[in-house]
Image (cartoon, rainbow, N blue to C red):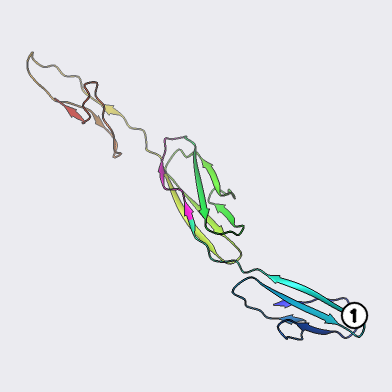
Amino acid sequence: NICVATNSTDPLTYLCNTTETTSCINVMPYNNSTYTVTLTDKCTSVAKDVVVTVPQPFNVFTTNDVTVCSGAIENLSVFTDSPETLNYLWSNGETTSTIAVSPVSTTTYTVSVSNYCTTVTKNIVVTVPQPFSLTADDITICKGASADICALANTNETLHYYWNTGQTTSCIN
């Protein structure tokens, strides 16, 4: 509803550009619109524009999920295709479009982006691999014999092996 308040005690005539003649009108525009109300009494005529803003739907894009080392600083961002000013609320309480995080364990950050009518929520997962230990046992072999040397780690993470021989597998011969 759009209503007009006045401090006059005289009888007034209301005329809106919608042809309504009451102090309040009900509007339901789909786009930004301007409504003009004109108040008149026997001596005065005053016009006033009332602008009704209708926020439009928008799309939200975020940075991709990421893997970082414990304690490393990572910037997470949200982007939209809206020309309007939007409100941001991250699960850590931040209210900007980009935040810097430094988790010590895997954390899901949620951002809600809203205008007056619509809220879009997205998640970004920041994975922090847990420390692992490496086991590679010393061995003794006879001269001219061959043996496998293996490196084992206590993790389910994908690891990359680099031996001083140039080999890149967990076991070498």
Total marks shown come to 1
Q: Quadrant of residue 163?
A: top left
> Magenta stretch: dominant SS?
loop
Quick one: 126 or 133, which is closer to the camera? 126
The residue drawn where x is 43% and y is 40% is 105
Image point 28% across, 40% down: which residue? 156
> How far across and how far down the image is residue 3, in percent?
75, 77
Residue 64 lies in the magenta-colored region: yes
- In the rendered image, which quarter is residue 51 located in? bottom right
Instruction: Look at 7% across and 15% down and name the residue there.
Output: 144
The residue lying toward the viewer, choosing from 61 and 43, is 43
Which residue is situated farthest in the top direction here? 143
Q: Residue at x 51, y 47 (%)?
A: 77
Q: Which residue is mark 1?
A: 44
Q: Could you say whether the residue bearing mark 1 is in a helix, strand or loop?
A: loop
The local crowd at label 1, few if under 14, some if 14 to 19, many if 20 or more residues have their Cα within 10 Å, is few
78 in relation to 55, above or below? above
Q: Quadrant of the N terminus?
A: bottom right
Q: Which residues are magenta?
A: 61-71
In the image, is 66 to the left or to the right of 26? left
Give how far across and how far down residue 61 sits, in percent. 47, 54
* Along the line of sight, the residue nearer the viewer: 104 or 6: 6
Q: Amino acid at mark 1?
A: Thr
As drawn, 137 above or below 57 = above
Estimate the x, y position of residue 132 in percent, counting from the top left. Answer: 33, 32
Q: Does residue 39 appear to the left or right of 141 in the view shown? A: right
> In the rendered image of this protein, does residue 116 appear above or below residue 152?
below
